[in-house]
Amino acid sequence: EADIYQTPRYLVIGTGKKITLECSQTMGHDKMYWYQQDPGMELHLIHYSYGVNSTEKGDLSSESTVSRIRTEHFPLTLESARPSHTSQYLCASSTRQGQETQYFGPGTRLLVL
Amino acid sequence: KNQVEQSPQSLIILEGKNCTLQCNYTVSPFSNLRWYKQDTGRGPVSLTIMTFSENTKSNGRYTATLDADTKQSSLHITASQLSDSASYICVVTDRGSTLGRLYFGRGTQLTVWP
């Protein structure tokens, strides 16, 4: 079992609220990622980071933002949640060496009413 | 366009039976192919990883094969158990970027009945 954690696991929130999804890993991995996954669909990369103070947008356009102030922490923020943001958000991490396996957190299921 | 296609979309089998899941990809240049298992409400967990030169890789009751010429992979599950019920995702990495760009299939939803 990988040491990567996400909180909250489930979140139901009203439109317009600001939310932050937390992700932390204790493996000392440099690379971290955020994916969005809808039921029965493939994972889509929305953000990634090579290390502290490094953040990049992924393939899927997202209104969310991320920060990487500490190696172990990679939070995702939505300033104003909308129903279209309803989805599962998965955080992952990997080492910087080559193309190592990504280890995934348990995910956060977000429902915006 | 780089793509990963999986079949079948869903599969129901009885406990103790074997099954084979398929993955076809068009990702190029190819680096490696992974099979992940994703339990409901959980994140994916890596089962196997194969590079260009590997044809077969086993992990317990899971055996993955790779034909890099035809760009096809399969995941064979032997003597299925109820705990095998999950989504199995094929993931292909390209060799053309330092990030190691991952291409995900939509997964095969496997249900094992007692």
Image: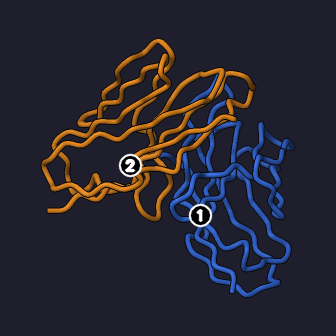
Chain colours: A blue, B orange
Which is nearer the eye, A67 or B65? B65
> Label 2 marks which chain's residue?
B
Q: Give the labeled residue for mark 1.
A: A38
Q: CA distance from mark 2 to mark 1?
A: 18 Å
Q: Is residue B46 left or right of residue A42?
A: left
Tell me, for residue B8, which label it has, or none. Answer: 2
Q: Is residue B59 left or right of residue A113?
A: left
Give x and y (percent) for residue A35.
Answer: 66, 53
What's the amino acid at mark 2?
Answer: Pro
Q: Residue at x 35, y 24 (%)?
A: B57
Please, what secondary structure does the residue beneath circle 2 have? loop
Q: Residue at x 20, y 47 (%)?
A: B80
What's the amino acid at mark 1?
Answer: Asp
**Quadrant of the drawing holding the C terminus of chain A:** bottom right
**Occupied quadrant, residue A67:** bottom right
Q: Residue at x 41, y 47 (%)?
A: B88
Label 1 crowding class (10 Å Cα cut-off): few <14, some 14-19, many 20+?
Answer: some
Which is nearer the eye, B5 or A90? B5
> Marks 2 and 1: CB-CB under 8 Å?
no
